[in-house]
Amino acid sequence: MAEHRIALSWSKGEAPFTYDAYPRNHEIRFKQGETIIVSAASAYRGDDSKADPEDLLVAALSSCHMLSFLALAAKKRLTVLSYQDDAVGFLEQKGGKLWMTRVVLQPKVIFDTDPGAQILGELHHMAHEACFIANSVKTEVIVQPR
């Protein structure tokens, strides 16, 4: 159906290639040339001022849920004025492996006219079911609207 490509680039630079010294920062280039510098988590000697792969996974899940939610709301002719999410991912040791066991999405949605709790809940449920990023991972995705 579709291919999604990125270009990742890393270079050792002048640093020695030892676990303590090699740089973790690297560049990811997306379509149309947009680039971001990312790193490892600070616990793995990365640059704490940069996003890490775990952050990007949480962001992808949050963004996909939001985009699915907005599409569903628009199709139901419900006008969304704003959408905010304070999502958090939990990297935990389970089954002998360290992995992102769960991500909690905490969306706050403002409509021009309140659709009510039942319709809001249905929209979030349908958005979760439609989110192909959530459908692609074993991570438990929990939606807790605010």
Image (spheres, rainbow, N blue to C red):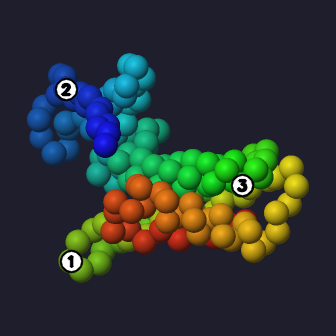
Quick one: which residue is furthest to the bottom in this view? Answer: 95
Question: Residue 138's spot in the image, x, y percent?
Answer: 33, 68
Identity of the residue drawn at 13% across and 31% down: 16
Dot 3 corresponds to which residue?
Answer: 76
Q: State the count of labels.
A: 3
Identity of the residue drawn at 17% across and 28% down: 12
Residue 119 picture quarter: bottom right
The quadrant of the rendering that contains the C terminus is bottom right
| Above-or-below relation of 33 to 135 | above
Q: CA distance from mark 3 to mark 2?
A: 49 Å
Question: Residue 10's spot in the image, x, y percent?
Answer: 22, 29
Judge the density around disc 3: few (<14), some (14-19), many (≥20) Cα neighbours within 10 Å. few
Instruction: Note whether residue 142 is visible.
Output: yes
Q: CA distance from mark 1 to mark 2?
A: 32 Å
N-terminal-most mark, 3 or 1: 3
3 vs 1, front mark: 3
Question: Residue 130's spot in the image, x, y percent?
Answer: 49, 59
User: Which mark is on residue 11?
Assistant: 2
Circle 1: element type: loop
N-terminal-most mark, 3 or 2: 2
Question: Residue 94's spot in the image, x, y percent?
Answer: 29, 78
Q: Nearer the viewer, residue 92 or 84?
A: 84
Q: Is residue 12 left or right of residue 111?
A: left
Dot 1 corresponds to which residue?
Answer: 96
Identity of the residue drawn at 23% across and 72% down: 97
Mark 1 residue type: Gly
Q: Nearer the viewer, residue 49 or 1?
A: 1
Quick one: which residue is furthest to the left in this view? Answer: 17
| Above-or-below relation of 129 to 12 | below
User: Which mark is on residue 16?
Assistant: none
